[in-house]
Image (tube, rainbow, N blue to C red):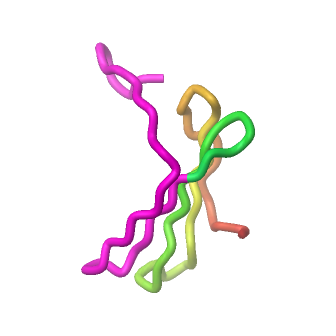
Amino acid sequence: MAAKPNARTGRVREQTIEDLPSGLTLRFEARDGGSRLLIVGRALPRGNREILFDAHGVAMSVGPALK
């Protein structure tokens, strides 16, 4: 699902991106029926975070990473 009118959707590969200046690591993972974005790093005062997306790319859940 596009986030704005006339926008196109795309696919994101499973990958890990480390941003050294911020100390954050972004990990994109495929899951059954959707995908997961995991944000990890010491810069996060309340711990690691995850965002779960359904098969259409709509955010279903946002919260602390349980894994």
Q: Residue at x 65, y 67 (%)?
A: 65
Q: How many marks?
A: 0
Q: Position of residue 42 (x, y in %)?
A: 46, 85
Q: Position of residue 30 (x, y in %)?
A: 62, 45
Q: Which quadrant is the C terminus positioned in?
A: bottom right
Of residues 55 and 5, the one nearer the viewer is: 55
Q: Quadrant of residue 54?
A: top right
Residue sitting farthest toward the top: 6
Q: Is residue 32 left or right of residue 9?
A: right
Q: Is residue 4 left or right of residue 12?
A: left
Of residues 23 and 44, the one nearer the viewer is: 23
Q: Is residue 31 magenta?
A: no
Q: Residue at x 37, y 71 (%)?
A: 18
Q: Position of residue 19 (x, y in %)?
A: 32, 72
Q: Is residue 1 above or below residue 60?
A: above
Q: Quadrant of residue 6?
A: top left
Q: Is residue 67 above or below residue 44?
A: above
Q: Residue at x 46, y 63 (%)?
A: 16
Of residues 48 and 45, the one nearer the viewer is: 48
User: Magenta stretch?
Assistant: 1-28
Residue sitting farthest toward the left: 21
Residue sitting farthest toward the bottom: 42
The chief SS type of the magenta part is loop
Q: Is residue 2 magenta?
A: yes
Q: Residue at x 56, y 40 (%)?
A: 59
Q: Is residue 5 above or below residue 55?
A: above
Q: Position of residue 27 (x, y in %)?
A: 50, 61
